[in-house]
Image: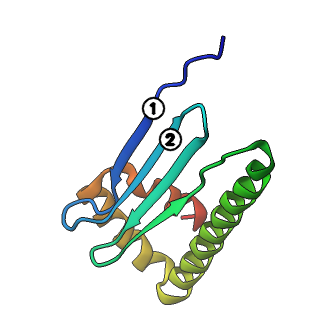
Amino acid sequence: MKPKIKQYYKREWLNSKHGRAFIITRASVSDEAVYAELDLSDCHEEISLDFNAYDLKSIPEKLKKIDKIRKALDEIEDKLLEGVATMFTREEWKEIKQARKAEEGEDHAALTYRLDL
């Protein structure tokens, strides 16, 4: 008897206050396939990424695709933080960080850590 897998769905809003930017992750399993999808939207555009696997042979390719996307996000995060470090003095960034923290809570703790402030 096959184990029963529940469907998975999660939506997170990407902007803290305004706009319709979101990320949706979905997954489900049927007798024919494993369905895994990711939808990304900023305020203007939306893309859907399909990671569906219909057989065992396709799984490594799907995992490789996910890994490439993860690496690209890590790289753009690094470049964003490098840019921030060159745009602002340490004191200016502390002021920006404190204002954002007061406005949004602890969401920016990762930036603080990454910039060694």
Q: How is the image coloured?
A: rainbow
- Read off the residue under disc 2: 27
Residue 65 marker: none
Measuring from the top left, give residue 21's x and y in whole percent.
30, 65
Q: Which circle's residue, 2 or 1, is located before the other in the chain?
A: 1
Position of the C terminus, as image quadrant, is: bottom right
The residue carrying pointer 2 sits among few (fewer than 14), some (14 to 19) or many (20 or more) residues within 10 Å by Cα, namely: some
Amino acid type assigned to the residue bearing label 2 in the image? Ala
Residue 36 x, y percent position in the rendering: 54, 47
Check if mark 2's residue and mark 1's residue have beta carbons within 8 Å.
yes
Q: Is residue 98 above or below residue 45?
A: above
Dot 1 alpha-carbon crowd within 10 angstroms: few under 14, some 14 to 19, many 20 or more: few
**From mark 2 to mark 1, how far is it between C-alphas?**
6 Å
Residue beneath the point at 61% across and 38% down:
32
What's the amino acid at mark 1?
Answer: Gln
On screen, residue 116 versus residue 68, left or right, reads left
Q: 102 or 108, which is in the foreground? A: 108
Find numbered disc 2 in the image and state the secondary structure of the residue it sits on: strand
| Residue 7: assigned label | 1
Q: Is residue 117 left or right of residue 92?
A: right
